[in-house]
Image (cartoon, helix red, strand yellow):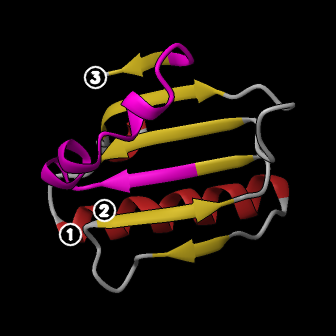
Amino acid sequence: MNQNKAADITEISVDQSFSEFEKILIASGSSNRQVVALAEKVQEGVKGLFRINCKVEGKENADWVLLDFGAVIVHIFKPEVREYYQIEKMWKGHLTQISS
């Protein structure tokens, strides 16, 4: 996501006894178009490297796209939508800032 200019990338490690997944990645794209492009790049990259398909939700509206890879969940938001939902606050105490 860094290579494609995603902003405010955050990684959240989740206790496996607490949830079905291990990690959540959250990033922002500056526009609907960039949100979709980032989601497509992540999806293509993971499929190419690891041969893992994912479930995709939200691509139609492109304010918030969710990619479900099973063990890893990726959320890509427009900044104002990310601010509104504040997913990071739900996982407070598990945050690892990757980059800005």
Q: Position of residue 20 (x, y in %)?
A: 81, 47
Q: Is residue 31 above or below residue 10?
A: below
Whether 94 is drawn above or below 69: the answer is above
Q: Residues within 10 Å of mark 1 (few under 14, many from 20)?
A: some
Q: Residues within 10 Å of mark 2 (few under 14, many from 20)?
A: many
Q: Residue at x 61, y 66 (%)?
A: 44
Question: Is disc 3 in contact with disc 2, using a CB cutoff of under 8 Å?
Answer: no
Checking the image for residue 100, the label placed there is 3
At mark 3, the secondary structure is: loop
Quadrant for the C terminus in the image:
top left
Mark 2, secondary structure of its residue: helix
Where is residue 63, by image quadrant? bottom left
Residue 12, how many percent across, how many down? 57, 27
Give the residue at mark 2: 35
Please, what secondary structure does the residue beneath circle 1 have?
A: helix
At label 2, the amino acid type is Val
- Residue type beneath disc 1: Asn
33 relative to 90 in the view: left or right = left
Q: Is residue 13 magenta?
A: no
User: How far apart are labels 3 and 2 at the CA level?
Assistant: 16 Å
Reading the image, the residue beneath label 1 is: 32
Q: Amino acid at mark 3?
A: Ser
- Taking the image as shown, residue 16 lies to the left or right of residue 82, namely right
| Mark before the other along the chain sequence, 1 or 3 | 1
- The residue at the point 43 percent across, 28 percent down is 10
Q: Quadrant of the N terminus?
A: top left
> Percent x, y for residue 97?
43, 17
In the image, 94 versus 8, the foreground residue is: 94
Range drawn in magenta: 74-95
The answer to whether marks 2 and 1 mark residues whose Cβ atoms lie closer than 8 Å is yes
